Amino acid sequence: MTKGQALASVVLVHFAINVAHGRAHVGAEVPLSLLGMLFVYIVILAAPLAGLGVWRWRPRLGGWIVAASMGGALVFGLINHFLIDGSDHVAHVAADWRLLFGITAMLLVVCELAGTVIGVWAARESIPTWRPASASK
């Protein structure tokens, strides 16, 4: 699998999991604040897709955008789904939606961790290697 294929795979899988997780949010009536909603739409949903688009012309920049947005999404999800004891915590979601909510929250952790690593790998592998001039010249 190439860097581009890995990056595209993780971004698209992340988007699909987020669609399912968003459905669980709506079904369980778990609201987000305005700032939370803006973070979700800009950093979690749009930025990885934008990074993937940028990858075609500027691989380093695209990789870093994916890495940063996935890292931000990972921290946001860990804090809101597993640490803060609020309505967005997996243990406090309505019983009918708890299984889907919990599974998608865990899948997001795994995917966002993978996305962060793949984004960094893709960005770093795209950096040209500097080699000093040979001493024999």
Image (tube, rainbow, N blue to C red):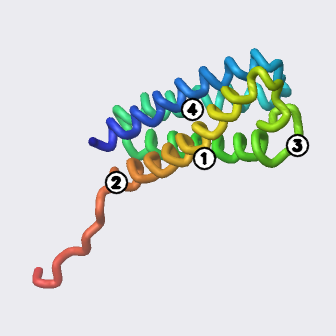
Calculate the distance from the C-alpha at mark 2 to the C-alpha at mark 1: 18 Å
The mark lying in front, picked from 3 and 4, is 3
Q: Mark 1 points at which residue?
A: 71
Task: Give the side of residue 87 with respect to residue 96, left or right.
Answer: right
x, y percent for residue 125? 34, 54
Q: Mark 3 points at which residue?
A: 85
Q: Which of marks 1 and 4 is nearer the N terminus?
A: 4
Calculate the distance from the C-alpha at mark 1 to the C-alpha at mark 3: 22 Å
State whether residue 94 is above or below residue 137: above
Q: Tag 4, which secondary structure? A: helix
Q: Mark 4 points at which residue?
A: 47
x, y percent for residue 37? 76, 26
The mark lying in front, picked from 1 and 3, is 3
Q: What residue type is labelled 3?
A: Asp
What residue lies at 11% left-to-right and 83% top-to-bottom?
136
Q: Name the residue under label 2.
A: 125
Q: Which of marks 2 and 1 is nearer the N terminus?
A: 1
* Contact check, label 3 and label 4, Cβ < 8 Å: no
Calculate the distance from the C-alpha at mark 1 to the C-alpha at mark 4: 11 Å
Between residue 71 and residue 24, name the one nearer to us: 24
Q: Which of marks 2 and 3 is nearer the N terminus?
A: 3
Calculate the distance from the C-alpha at mark 2 to the C-alpha at mark 3: 40 Å
Between residue 52 and residue 13, name the one nearer to us: 13
